[in-house]
């Protein structure tokens, strides 16, 4: 632990890479844990595809609206706030997230690199025009969980969630910024992700190849266990505030 804190303090470029686990303590279910309620018999990975939306748009739109409703009512947790605090303490810092919620931003982080899109940015599947959600928090879809997606005012095609689905490319600019950050950092923190979904998961390998120290924060084992320089087994809402306190409280 002393070595870890020394390396973090000495780092000139820190990258934090987050996944759904960071928002778990805010009440947002992760992707590979069992789904809740109406969706408990469905695998999230099966809902998050262009084919699923084409086959059953109201089911997929209903699921994303349910998640968006949860996010709107959720608050950032101490893990989000610790990451924001870190940003002001290191010379060069990047936050890369796979999360489609805005809890990092609401927790105080800025210039967040979103690799998998954002729930708040739906757009037309036909002409790609952005769509603005009504301000009200969406009602939880009841009964079947279905909600008909709105249609585009310009071309009449369906509005789709503003997220990246399996089989779709990552947003070009975000992916480039993420790769550049991973290749140039000297300390890479992988937090709350199963590190299973490519190409995002390859960022840790890029940082490792560039010689960075890799810290993993996760309460459960992952494929990164064997290669990370350090692993702290625990929830990010507890581990990250402690890490910030240990590294910088004496400064
Ligand atoms: N603190 C930290 N990590 C946690 C916590 C917590 N409180 N609770 C759970 N975790 C960990 C789990 O152990 C798991 O390793 O968070 C991880 C969540 O993994 P996934 O559900 O696979 O989420 P993620 O890695 O973000 O998934 C990547 O897959 O479905 C797609 O596009 C979706 O962005 C998502 C991507």
Image (tube, grey):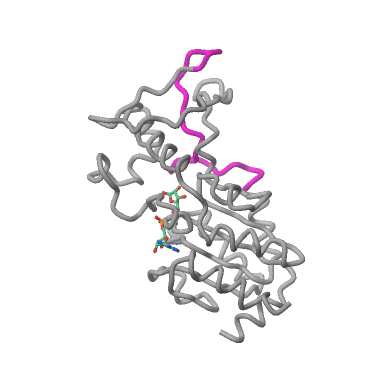
Residue 104 x %, y %: 57, 51
Q: Main secondary structure of the magenta part?
A: loop
Say above or below: 140 vs 131: below
- Residue 208 sits in which quadrant? bottom right
User: 179 or 118, which is in the foreground?
Assistant: 118
- Residue 85 sits in which quadrant? bottom right
Q: Residue at x 56, y 53 (%)?
A: 97
Say above or below: 57 vs 91: above
Residue 173 x %, y %: 66, 44
Range shown magenta? 152-174
* Quarter of the image with the N terminus in it: bottom right
* Quarter of the image with the C terminus in it: bottom right
In the drawing, does residue 36 fall left or right of residue 21? left
Say above or below: 126 vs 250: above
Say above or below: 98 vs 63: below
Residue 193 x %, y %: 46, 60
Q: How many marks?
A: 0
């Amino acid at each position: 632990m002393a070595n870890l804190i020394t390396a973090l303090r000495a780092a000139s470029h820190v990258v934090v890479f987050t996944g759904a686990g960071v928002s778990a303590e805010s009440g947002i279910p992760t992707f590979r844990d069992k789904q809740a309620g109406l969706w408990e018999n469905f695998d999230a990975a099966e809902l998050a595809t262009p084919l699923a939306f084409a086959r059953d748009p109201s089911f997929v739109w209903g699921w994303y609206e349910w998640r968006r409703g949860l996010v709107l009512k959720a608050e950032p947790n101490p893990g989000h706030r610790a990451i924001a605090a870190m940003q002001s303490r290191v010379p060069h810092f990047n936050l890369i997230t796979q999360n489609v919620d805005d809890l990092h931003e609401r927790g105080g982080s800025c210039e967040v690199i979103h690799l998998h899109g954002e729930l708040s940015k739906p757009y037309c599947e036909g002409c790609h025009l952005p769509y603005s959600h009504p301000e009200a928090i969406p009602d939880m879809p009841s009964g079947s969980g279905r909600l008909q997606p709105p249609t585009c005012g310009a071309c009449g095609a369906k509005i789709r969630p503003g997220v990246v689905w399996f089989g779709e490319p990552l947003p070009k600019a975000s992916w480039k910024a993420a790769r550049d950050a991973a290749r140039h950092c000297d300390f890479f923190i992988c937090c709350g992700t199963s590190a299973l979904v490519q190409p995002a998961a390859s960022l840790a390998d890029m940082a490792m190849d560039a010689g960075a120290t890799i810290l993993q924060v996760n309460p459960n084992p992952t494929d990164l266990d064997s290669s990370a320089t350090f692993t702290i087994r625990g929830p990010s809402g507890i581990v990250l505030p402690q890490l910030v306190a240990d590294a910088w409280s004496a400064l």
